[in-house]
Amino acid sequence: MKKTKLLAIALCAALFTTVFAGCGKQGGNEDGSSQEKVVIDFSMLNLSGDIEGWTAMVEAANELLKEENIEISISKVNGTGWPEYYQKVASQMAADNSPDIGRIAESYMPTLIAKNQVVDLTSYIENDFDMSQYYEKTFENSAYVDGKYYGVPSGLNNYLLYYNKDMFDEAGLDYPSADWNDPTSFEEIADMARTLTKETEGGKQFGFYTGPYMAEIGMFSTSLGGNNVFDAEGNPSINDATSKQVYKWFDGMLRDDGSMPRPTDTAVMSAFDMFTNGRLAMIVDGTWWLGSIGSIEGVNVGIAAVPGAEDGSAYTSQFVDSFVIYEGCEHKDEAWKAIKALVSQEGFEALAATGVGGTPVHKEVVNAVTEKLLGENVDEASKKVAEEALNHTVKVPYNEYYEEADQKVNNTMDEWLLGQITSDEYADKVQQILLDYKAQAEE
Amino acid sequence: MMRKKKIPVKKLLSGAILAVASVTMLFPFYWMIKTALMTNRAALEFPPKLVTWPLYLGNFVEVFGTTGLGRAMGNSLLIAAVSTLGVLFLSSLAAFAFAKLHFKHSGFWFGAIFGTMLIPSQILLIPMYVLFAKIHWVDTFLPLIVPQIMINGYGVFLIKQFMAGIPDSYIEAAKLDGLGYFGIYRRIMLPLCKPPLVTLGVFTFVGNWNNFIGALIYIDSEEKFTLPLIINSFRTEYSVEWGLLMAASAISVLPMIIIYLFAQKSFVEGISMTGVKG
Amino acid sequence: MHEVKERREDMKKNLSKKESRWGMLFVAPQIIGLIFFVLVPLASALYLCFCEWDFTSSPVWVGLKNFEAVFIFDSDMFFKTLENTAIFILGVIPLTMFLALGLALLANQKLKFLSFYKSALFMPMVTSSVAVAMVWYWLFAPDMGLINYLIGKLGLEGPGWLSDPRWSRVAIILMTAWLKTGYYFIVFLAGLKAVPVVYYEAAKIDGASGWQRFRNITLPQISPVTFFVFVMLVIDVFNMFSEAYVLTRGGPMYSTYTLIMYIYTQAMTYFNLGKASVASLILILFAGSISALQFYLSKRWVNYDA
């Protein structure tokens, strides 16, 4: 026993030294070549479903960059989502170890911009970019602040109304409207949801779901002619008349009719999982599900415009992920060229072929994606709805304190859902939370 | 009056209670394996059934086919093994000193080492990362191994408590036999401390094997990825691929079960003290 | 005579010097580790209590702004975490100690299938916490969970569990106790195994009953281990995070929101290291005083066999 212990310690020391020997980070440039090749470190969130898409895009981009002697090298970040990606990148920046470029979700842009963690790209875009090939409106997302651009869109996601055709047929109801300019009204949705809610053998079947969160309230409120969470000056306005109307609509379904599952009910099995398992008739959710819809089995899916005002249009929130250059980058010009190559037509085509990344913002490539993702599973009318959506998008009003306020707002939601306060009172509470955070941010 | 026959009822009852407790403890494990053997769709069926048939092997096939899985397991094994050996050695050594030796300010130092357990790891994470970056230890396994070996409040505390219960007379006797302090440590204290050593060893190994956040922050290169990093990538941006995730978790659990079964034999069944009694 | 006495005293001094030296040598690695891997980062973390940092430039001194943010701005969240911690301490610790010690006592006999029981009780430690959280979710789900289903069979209506602020705490306490029981069962069992069998034999010969043996031999003999479990459980409760986070995210209405969740969210999600450091300071002081109290009282009831 003693000899083995000594042996173990010796082994330990040996392993220790080998591990020690294999350390040290490689520099950014490859040396030895006569011309200086610049390697751009692209930090990428590595999730199982997406990796091939982005790798394909990078390969296409590298083809274009060969003549400029630039190469994009991927650094994978294996996390469960954007929070871990941001943790990793922020840690690296704190230690002067920053990656050169990356792709990040829109919700993080305000923080990145406020903390000076990303490079201002405005002059590059004004002098070295052909905007005519892209949907310019999509560039006006949270990466665009005070007239300055801090990111280039890598893809767009928005909300659609997915519904279960068979359930509608069985109940003898007309399908929800496919016309963004004449959408199904809120009252009609509530009625449909009520009819489609019932007890079945496999548990309760619900009629409708969408998150009763600030972004959705804002989106619906806009279609009613109101503000999108904040007014034009950026002051919170979530307890104005139209927003309260939307909260009341949710209130009816959540508490009175029981036609909508509560957020706690969707903690482990998400609402979208309920939909694919035939337990939910309608769901307003993102285009990130298009691939799943295309391969769904057992549910006959239709796509409609999201609910809107009785006599108006419908609006859908857009979520635009961006390519950014991190502030610690030492080759900013080359990094810009790399991004340009990524968002080229070739880049987007390579990406679209895999169906990853949402709707591309390059005009030539848009239709390819919807076709590819939805395939045979969905009829032509539904595909058109998905494409038309791009003309009815509205920005999610992210700002510096949005995420933190949102967390608090959602945590207070139970008071309303448990019936302790009315939906109007809840709207007032949300407004107060936003005002408090705004005041604190301005200190 | 002396009872001659042992009433088996007590043993039967004990067995029954332990059996029930065991089943409840095993249930999540069973659930994990069961979900791993279902398609993603079946995994979300409601109400959840206790047994699903037929079994679906696709998840395991896909997980095994994942590039880098084997290598990640190797990396995790290396880190966990080296860390565990290091922790066992240095913590027990320090515990011996605190429990049985007298030196200046030993109470103070023990308090300080113990106190490290009260500090939330989250606030140390970034400052430590910056520190390690400055000495170029980033993207190596060193930050994942060295700190816990060099300072381990849990290990020192656990072993010390056990060692404190060992009679001083053993040590006196050993000194009379001419043993130096390291010899006493090696030949007397360690063998007597098998149970807490095994406990500490298993806890440390498992903790390292499952360490996700450390690996996320410190490791950049793909070939150095550890198992938790691979397991956590079985998600798409918006949903979890339950079947794959559970299959990967099941594979991850396997080596630890093997190790525990081996460690079991060292959970000495009754230590009979035949030494000097004070 | 003098010489002999002097030499003996010299020898004693040398011996104690020798003991001193070896003692310090043995703890030296831990002390080095303490300084470099704890005190140095801790110092920077505490410095950050008074700063704002955007990661790309140096931290900016802002005085007490972070304290204000935590105690005043986030006050309802923050004080709720303290309340929750107190409740969890009162709930989790007695329950876990009772279960762990109870099971260990049962397992400390010659039983069939004993190895199986020991392996099984150890399982939660190695199972993925995602799987554990999933299973507990299925158990506690209000409309369709197993527990309410069984309660329904008895003709009663089960509570809202995870959607009800009062019951969610009960659910978390039950889950945490269950999780920790496995760990501490092993620790207690190791402690029980170390009690010399001769003590029990002698007591039996003297006619002591089972309960008397337990009270007068077992408890005192395992008191160091019991103390360890007690102290560690307090620390565990302060650190309660992963499984609860997955199940309830700290809700509903912050009823299961722990201090560690607050620190984690501030540090890792919003990267407000200043606020996280302030909250950590509170946690360290709070947990530290409880531990100090425990150590102080331990002199009364912990029995070190010497």
Image (spheres, coloured by chain):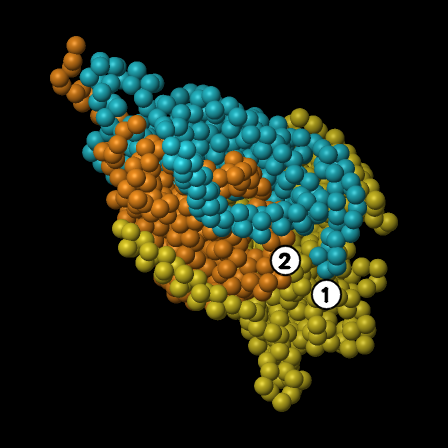
Chain colours: A yellow, B orange, C cyan
Give how far across and how far down residue A218 sits, in percent: 74, 46
Disc number at residue B130? 2
Q: Residues within 10 Å of mark 1 (few under 14, many from 20)?
A: some
Q: Residues within 10 Å of mark 2 (few under 14, many from 20)?
A: many
Farthest bottom residue in view: A34
> Residue type at mark 1?
Glu
How far apart marks 1 and 2 lie (CA) works out to 17 Å
Task: Name the element at disc 1.
Answer: loop
Nearer the observer, C241 or C227: C227
> Residue type at mark 2?
Val
Nearer the observer, C187 or B215: C187
Residue C132: name its quadrant: top left
Give how far across and how far down residue C67 sits, in percent: 74, 38
Residue C10 relative to residue A334: left or right: left
Give how far across and how far down residue A275 sits, in percent: 52, 48
Disc number at residue A327? 1
Give how far across and how far down residue B203 sits, in percent: 41, 45
